[in-house]
Image: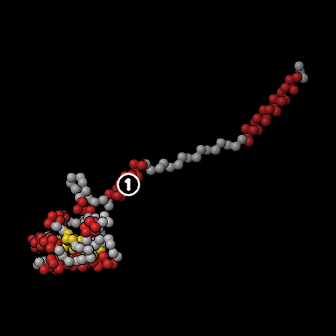
Amino acid sequence: MTHFRPRLAAPALIALVAFTGACATRAPATQPEPPPPAAPSATGTQAAGTQTQSRALPPVSQGGTVDQRQTASVPASGGTGFMDPNARAMAASIAEIGERVFFETDSFTLSPESRTVLERQAAWMQGNPGARFMIAGNADERGTREYNLALGARRANAVRDYLISLGIAPSRLETVSYGKERPIDPRPTPDGWSMNRNAQTVVLGGQ
């Protein structure tokens, strides 16, 4: 019995030394990586986008709906900004009596119906002596851009000349041609083309 215990103690001691060495050489545990920064919330992103878009939206009327007259507020002369309230009221008035006259294909001759409309316009202009106007000539989609720009200019000038003959001061009337660039009817049909061959009288401003 005295010789049996040292033989058992030696293997146990060897195992203990091996276990201690393994613990000493084990690599230290790695620290967990910090979590990535939180992404902006969807609510914050949407609010920023809404704020950016709101600067480009047309103003809303008191009733809560978009005022359609303000969406076309850029004057035909190329200016920027919304029409003043007085000009909007004038535009609504002239629209009631007829703001467009229409032409036959490849023509800038005023029809009897067009002359009647322009006579009503002239009477309204004489009752609003402080107002100024732009006459915009338009054409249908057929033909080249250059041809239709020239035709639109002739139509605008025909309207201007007739209004001057009715007593409207030339200084109150400007003209521009949009050719086929601003159709009011998208249909590629004879009915659509007949709507797009026109000249429109636009209020620029005034008292």
Query: Residue 195: where, in percent of width, then height?
Result: 25, 67
Q: What residue is rendered at 13% in x and 71% in y? A: 116
User: Would you identify the image quadrant in which residue 179 lies?
Assistant: bottom left
> Secondary structure under badge 1?
helix
How many numbered marks, from 0 up? 1
Q: Which residue position holds label 1?
A: 48
Q: What residue is rendered at 37% in x and 52% in y? A: 47
Q: What residue is rendered at 89% in x and 19% in y? A: 1
Amino acid carrying label 1: it is Ala
From the viewer's perspective, tell me whether residue 183 is left or right of residue 130: right
**Is residue 23 or residue 3 the one in the foreground?**
23
Is residue 97 visible in this depiction of the protein?
yes
User: Would you identify the image quadrant in which residue 146 lies?
Assistant: bottom left
**Is residue 127 or residue 123 the one in the foreground?**
123
User: Would you identify the image quadrant in which residue 177 lies?
Assistant: bottom left
Query: Residue 129: where, in percent of width, then height?
Result: 11, 73
From the viewer's perspective, tell me whether residue 27 is left or right of residue 200: right
**Is residue 153 or residue 144 the one in the foreground?**
144
Is 157 situated above or below 68?
below
Residue lying furthest right: 3
